[in-house]
Image (cartoon, grey):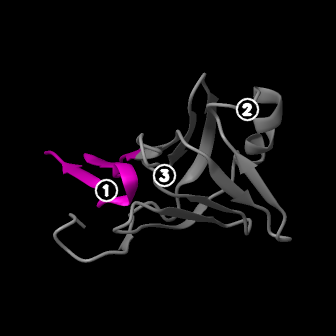
């Protein structure tokens, strides 16, 4: 999966269940687990879209919206990741078993998202839409 290979890249998180949704001043963190204790976290730092199965879209920005406007993310608890893909332009797409999707693109000035895990996988969106940075330390 390192960026030497042409994207898009399928991320190894299918089947992981979201059990933790964390709010902070500038980030939303989703932590998902799979049987056996393996886990991953996805930090949504920049503006992103949560789309409902019926097509309704929520445009969310953890750095500028009040937590009350972000509570729709609590509906992701106990949802399961069906697929996740990162592109060479630093777009992240997460499809959930419920039919919901999360889409977040790059930011021109800041890192807009990060994913850590499973294992030693660490993926950080490239600023301005460049290749995401991979870290696969052992």
Q: Nearer the viewer, residue 73 or 129?
A: 129
Does label 2 or label 1 sit earlier along the sequence? 2
Residue drawn at x 56%, y 32% is 27
Q: Quadrant of residue 57?
A: bottom right
Would residue 118 be visible to someone looking at this image?
A: no
Residue that label 1 marks = 132
* Label 1 SS: loop
Residue drawn at x 36%, y 47% is 117
In the rendered image, the quadrant that contains the N terminus is: bottom left
> How far, Cα to Cα, is label 2 from label 1?
26 Å
Residue that label 2 marks = 65
Does label 3 or label 1 sit earlier along the sequence? 3
In the rendered image, the quadrant that contains the C terminus is: top left
Residue drawn at x 62%, y 51% is 48
Q: Nearer the viewer, residue 126 or 85?
A: 126
Residue that label 3 marks = 35
């Amino acid at each position: 999966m390192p960026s030497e290979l042409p994207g898009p890249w399928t991320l190894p998180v299918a089947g992981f269940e979201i059990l933790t949704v964390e709010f902070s001043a500038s980030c939303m963190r989703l932590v998902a687990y799979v049987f056996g204790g393996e886990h991953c976290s996805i930090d949504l730092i920049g503006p992103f879209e949560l789309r409902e199965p019926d097509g309704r879209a929520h445009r969310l920005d953890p750095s500028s919206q009040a937590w009350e406007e972000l509570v729709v993310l609590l509906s992701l608890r106990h949802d399961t990741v069906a697929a996740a893909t990162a592109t060479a332009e630093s777009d992240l797409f997460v499809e959930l078993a419920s039919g919901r999707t999360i889409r977040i693109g790059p930011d021109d000035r800041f890192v807009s998202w990060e994913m850590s895990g499973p294992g030693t996988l660490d993926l950080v969106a490239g600023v301005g839409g460049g290749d995401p940075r991979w870290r696969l330390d052992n």
